[in-house]
Amino acid sequence: AQSVTQLDSQVPVFEEAPVELRCNYSSSVSVYLFWYVQYPNQGLQLLLKYLSGSTLVKGINGFEAEFNKSQTSFHLRKPSVHISDTAEYFCAVSAYQGGSEKLVFGKGTKLTVNP
Amino acid sequence: KAGVTQTPRYLIKTRGQQVTLSCSPISGHRSVSWYQQTPGQGLQFLFEYFSETQRNKGNFPGRFSGRQFSNSRSEMNVSTLELGDSALYLCASSSLAGVEKTQYFGPGTRLLVL
């Protein structure tokens, strides 16, 4: 079965600083990887996804993530954060397993951007 | 296009009651998935419907059920509510089914069971 570990439950940073939100996964089959963002009192919004091809994926709002198969990681990065990036970020892994689709989310990382 | 809408946005029920939540997907989307979000368990998949057929189901008891109508609108029902059912219930729609699909989420229905 797949599992997703987001290594940091909370990440505080200052505005304009770089940030990395870490995500590791485990799976015995090929996976598809997603990062979603959830702003307060809202649903989830897709930031970016890795399906195949280039391991560096660029998403919305200046975010990017790199798929590292050997380290089973899909870390999310942004070179300079804004106050408006304060939100909760979820990493998710999708795969066919046991004849059906499985989508598993990590527990989330709360990013707080301070002035 | 209008986004995914969920009604009601907030709901308070008591133990033992039942509840029905509604989800209207983005126009043209035929796949609707439901998730339960709690602080302790995080986001957990409930079920997915595609063209009125349930095509995938998570590990929830039979008290949780759903259906999809011919216009792709979906409802989720929880019978005999328990305190642990208090959660944010999220609906997501997609134009396609499959593991590669991009899901568009609604704002959720926050259910409080007293």
Image: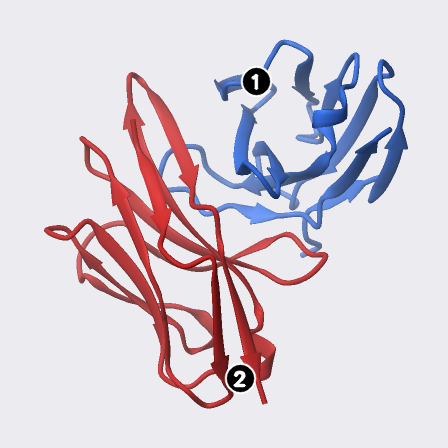
Decide which of B13, B20 is in the foreground and name it: B13
Determine the colour of chain A: red
Mark identifier at residue B30: none
Chain that appears blue: B
Say whether residue A14 is left or right of residue B89. Answer: left
Q: Residue A79 at what x, y percent from top left?
A: 36, 83
Image-based side of A80 in relation to A52, left or right: right
Residue carrying label 2: A82
Q: Amino acid at mark 2?
A: His
Residue at 67% across, 17% down? B64
Name which residue lies at 51% across and 41% down: B95
Relative depth, front residue between B102 and B46 = B46
Residue B4 rendering spot, x and y as whole percentages: 68, 47
Q: Quadrant of residue B53?
A: top right
Residue B60 is labelled as 1
Q: Residues within 10 Å of mark 1 (few under 14, many from 20)?
A: few
The residues tagged by marks 2 and 1 sit, at their Cα atoms, a distance apart of: 39 Å
Q: Where is residue B34 drawn, in percent x and y?
A: 60, 32
A58 vs A22, nearest the viewer: A22
